[in-house]
Image: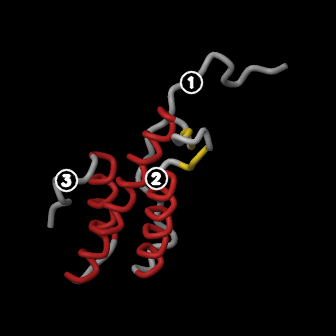
Amino acid sequence: MKPPKHLRPATRRWFAGVLDDFDLEDHHVRLLTLAGEAWDRGQAAREYIDANGMTFTDRFGQPKARPEVAIERDSRIGFARLIRELALDGVDAPEAPRSPRTADYGSRR
């Protein structure tokens, strides 16, 4: 079985690695697919939050949480639950893209 094409490359590699290491039945592969989708969705939300911040100002001038914050949270919870359901607690998560370093990264005061 091949990883679904709609998953990100790092998630496809993770998916393939899990399939190589474990003998999964068809319904487990479907859960694994959902886990990969949840991971990718959470990463997409994280990238948006990194670029645009966690809050925005509404028309009344009040700060509000971006919807992507809830998407990231829900995706993280879903991923964790699916991994637990598959008993893959010892398996590393797919690689997360790293945020670019800023000028003050690692500097001491």
CA gap, disc 1 and disc 3? 28 Å
Please tell me how crowded label 1 is: few (under 14), some (14-19), or many (20+) other residues with Cα within 10 Å.
few
Whichever of callouts 3 and 2 sits on the residue coming sooner in the sequence is: 3
Q: Are marks 1 and 3 in contact (CB under 8 Å)?
A: no
Please tell me how crowded label 2 is: few (under 14), some (14-19), or many (20+) other residues with Cα within 10 Å.
few
Q: Residue at x 54, y 37 (%)?
A: 53
Q: Which residue is mark 1?
A: 101
Whichever of callouts 1 and 3 sits on the residue coming sooner in the sequence is: 3
Amino acid tagged 2? Pro
Whichever of callouts 1 and 2 sits on the residue coming sooner in the sequence is: 2
Amino acid tagged 3? His
Q: Name the element at disc 3.
A: loop
- Displayed quadrant of residue 19: bottom left
Q: Which residue is mark 3?
A: 6
Q: Residue at x 27, y 54 (%)?
A: 12
Q: Relative to 25, is 71 above or below? A: above
Residue 17 at what x, y percent from top left? 32, 60
Please tell me how crowded label 3 is: few (under 14), some (14-19), or many (20+) other residues with Cα within 10 Å.
few
Q: Residue at x 34, y 56 (%)?
A: 14
Q: Which residue is mark 2?
A: 67
Q: Is residue 20 left or right of residue 2?
A: right
